[in-house]
């Protein structure tokens, strides 16, 4: 009986020597840094990656959104979710063999650094495969001041939590859409329900079109020079004269006859367009040179007549 007790004690000692504080000393895998317990790497990977409402994934470690091409295991990692609006830069990481094109405002983007996309516009990433193109991801980059959007439909699975316009907190009536038709400074906070991460957007909305006066134009026509007045120094002008590009005059006066098409854009991207015709006219300078030209012609004709008469007399 005593021998059996000694044998049990020895066995317990052997077990305890291989397990200290509940930790298996023979385990060679990853352990939790706080408890020292073995980590189930499959479970850890599942906890690190969250499935989103739109079918994409979110990686808690890299803070990137992952979208996989249809009928493929190839994916793209994005710093923004599908449908997100931002005023900052966007980073895209494509798997090497993924064939895709990036479009901005409907045109294919050229010479773009996918790791640092900064140009304002509406973007879409289109992947190619099996003869069918598929839009995998879309996002919008706005300048800090803009009139380009009237509303923001939040990405699927995101809810609006706070809206402040020009310092005043607004009552939230729709958690999925932000009405941005009112001018002012917007501070928008919204929340991803599945990841628990908050996001923000701060932007100044200005929907008022630029104002400019074309002095000298009446009912779309002018019979003299046209002076450009009452515009902002931040406005930009695109001028076409008879369909050809024409530089903005330094003295702000348009003098050449012809058909003008002028597009004015303010610092928020709002535009106006005006068209008019400057009809042929003679100003004082033109009249002066016209008189000189006629005088020269008359003198030449008179000289020719005088020369012929002189030859006849001889």
Image (cartoon, rainbow, N blue to C red):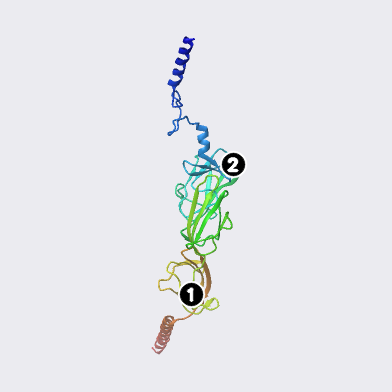
- In the depicted structure, whether residue 309 falls above or below residue 164: below
- Which residue is pictured at 52% across the width and 74% down the height? 277
Q: Position of residue 140 (x, y in %)?
A: 52, 54
Q: Residue 213 carries which label?
A: 1
- In the depicted structure, whether residue 256 falls above or below residue 54: below
Q: Which mark is residue 70?
A: 2
Residue 47 falls left or right of residue 21: right
Determine the image quadrant of residue 235: bottom left
Residue 154 falls left or right of residue 252: right
Report helix, strand or loop for mark 2. loop
In this view, the residue in front, 2 or 300, is: 2
Q: Position of residue 46 (x, y in %)?
A: 53, 36
Q: Distance between the residues labelled 2 and 1?
A: 54 Å
Residue 103 seen in the current view: no
- In the depicted structure, whether residue 68 falls above or below residue 290: above
In this view, the residue in front, 98 or 310, is: 98
In this view, the residue in front, 185 or 209, is: 185
- In the depicted structure, whether residue 2 falls above or below residue 79: above
């Amino acid at each position: 009986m005593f021998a059996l007790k000694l044998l049990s004690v020895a066995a317990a000692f052997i077990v305890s020597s291989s397990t200290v504080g509940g930790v298996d000393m023979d385990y060679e895998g990853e352990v939790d840094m706080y408890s020292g317990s073995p980590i189930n790497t499959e479970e850890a990977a599942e906890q690190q990656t969250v499935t989103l409402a739109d079918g994409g994934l979110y990686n808690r470690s890299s803070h990137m959104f992952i979208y996989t091409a249809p009928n493929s295991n190839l994916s793209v990692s994005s710093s923004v979710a599908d449908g997100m609006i931002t005023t900052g830069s966007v980073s895209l990481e494509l798997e090497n063999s993924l064939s895709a094109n990036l479009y901005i405002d409907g045109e294919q983007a050229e010479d773009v650094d996918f790791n640092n996309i900064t140009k304002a516009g509406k973007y879409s990433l289109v992947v190619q495969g099996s003869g069918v193109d598929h839009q995998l991801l879309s996002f919008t980059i706005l300048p800090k001041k803009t009139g380009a959007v009237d509303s923001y439909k939040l990405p699927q699975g995101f809810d609006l939590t706070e809206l402040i316009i020009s310092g005043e907190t607004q009552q939230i009536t729709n958690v999925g859409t932000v009405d941005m038709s009112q001018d002012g400074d917007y501070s928008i906070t919204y929340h991803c329900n599945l990841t628990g991460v908050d996001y923000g957007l701060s932007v100044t909305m200005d929907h008022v079109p630029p104002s400019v006066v074309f002095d000298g134009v009446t009912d779309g026509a002018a019979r003299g020079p046209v002076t450009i007045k009452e515009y902002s120094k931040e406005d930009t002008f695109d001028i076409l004269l008879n369909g050809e590009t024409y530089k903005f005059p330094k003295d702000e006066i348009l003098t050449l006859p012809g058909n003008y098409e002028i597009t004015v854009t303010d610092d928020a991207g709002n535009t106006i367009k005006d068209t008019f015709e400057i009809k042929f006219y003679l100003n004082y300078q033109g009249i002066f040179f016209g008189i000189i030209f006629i005088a020269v012609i008359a003198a030449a004709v008179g000289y020719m007549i005088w020369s012929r008469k002189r030859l006849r007399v001889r």
